Image: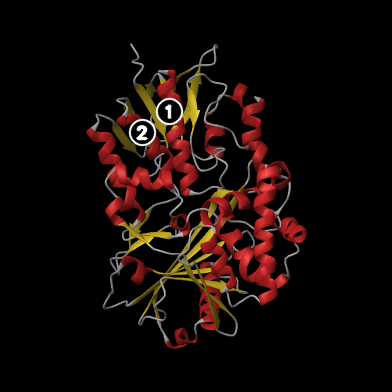
Amino acid sequence: MIDSKDVVVVGGGFGGLSAGVALAERGFRVALLERKPELGGRAYSFEDPDTGDQVDNGQHVLMGCYSETLDFLRKIGSGNNLVFQKDLEIQMLARPGRSATLRTARLPGPLHMSAALMRYGHLSLKERFAAARGGLRLLKLRRRDRGALERMTVTELMNQLGQSENARRAFWYPLSVATLNDEPEVSSAGLLAEVLMRAFFSRRADSAFVYSRVGLSELYCRAARSFVERAGGVIARRAVVEGLEVDGGGVVERIRLRDGRKLEAANFIVAAQAEQLIRMLPENLVADPFFQRINQLTTSPIICVHAWFDREVTRSAFVGFIGTTTQWLFNKRRIFERHGERHPGYLSFVISGARRLVDLPNDDLLDLVLSDLSAMIPAARHAKVSKAIVLKEKQATMAPTTDSHRLRPGVATPLKNLFLAGDWIQTGLPATIESAVISGRAAAAAVAARA
């Protein structure tokens, strides 16, 4: 007989593991299934055998406003692996080697961000005041007419706010691409407004960056697995779900694995990507309007290039590039607080919304990134690359289009005991780690309410 406390969670990324931990904490018996050899979904790390460094599949940064994620990490005992930057401080480089820092002041929010904007050297004085006025108009529009923002792209928003091309290039668009992972021409202004409100125009502490001292897998995968297993749950890797078996009353009876096994439970949470969910459904359900909408969601890629140099080329932990294809540089030696003797310079470069580049050969992408680095940091021209890894996540995140607002589902589905989790679930946020954790915890709460 199936116990009401038995739950199967499909997917071992932030969404699935946060759901599993929340359920285990409530006394449920969790069976969590991950199709890959390791946990982590699209946010994992692995050890490079040559350097011993932990390599993240994509550079992920937390922020002080990620309250659900930070609480999840503290709950599983990983809080001591985080480094909290007291204030937002981003060095932005523009050709030819011009540097300006976006640094918040020690003032109550949102004055801290206004002061940062007024001291930002890549904008003229006129552009700084125009950007400040634009931010106020954006917040006012968010309060009064969110629907209008959701129908508008970031580029259309900039036109309405009267922002100059330089202000877009040096301030607005870097923030948009970094947080939404797509081009401003297609990204939702509503999602950008939500990010800016929560991260930059609220409390001062909310805008601070939070780095992990360790690789992503060590940060949350192992600790979450231990938490679930200590509560009597089971976590299985290389467990590929082929389908959901549904009865005539709209209840999932069991899941079918590729190896022939079948698992029964009272409730199921699918914390996988949208296209994987669609593949699990019986044919007659794919045409259901609820699932049809999900099937229309699209994705956006990210390219991450890891390179090891024979010397340190910058002392900054985090640098933004303006006017180049490469958008962000992370100095992993500074973030990890570990200085390698054989490879003293370990840098990670990020290109978000990389549709036009993702199919290029890895060597071409490495050459592109190194060319951008040399243009922005002249000291790097004398450094030698000893090793490089190019990682492409072709379906890194849900594309943050204006259509995504109506297409994203909530955690509940037309099937009474099937719930959803993942960064693409409707949380009001773009597809971020915080969105994934919010959805995972919401799915767990829905299961608990049903039980």
* Residue 126 percent across, percent down from the top left: 70, 74
**Callout 1 amino acid:** Ala
- Which residue is found at the position 62% from the left and 71% from the top? 170
| Residue corresponding to mark 2 | 22
- Please tell me which residue lies in front, 95 or 71: 71
- Which residue is found at the position 50% from the left and 16% from the top? 251
**In the image, is 286 to the left or to the right of 330?**
right
Label 1 vs label 2: CA separation? 8 Å
* Residue 151 percent across, percent down from the top left: 73, 45
**Callout 2 amino acid:** Ala
* Residue 346 percent across, percent down from the top left: 37, 72
- Which residue is found at the position 65% from the left and 33% from the top? 293
Q: Quadrant of residue 25?
A: top left
Q: Secondary structure at mark 1?
A: helix
Q: Secondary structure at mark 2?
A: helix
Q: Is residue 339 above or below residue 432?
A: below
Give neighbour class at mark 2: few <14, some 14-19, many 20+ (Cα, 10 Å).
Answer: many
Numbered badge on residue 445: 1
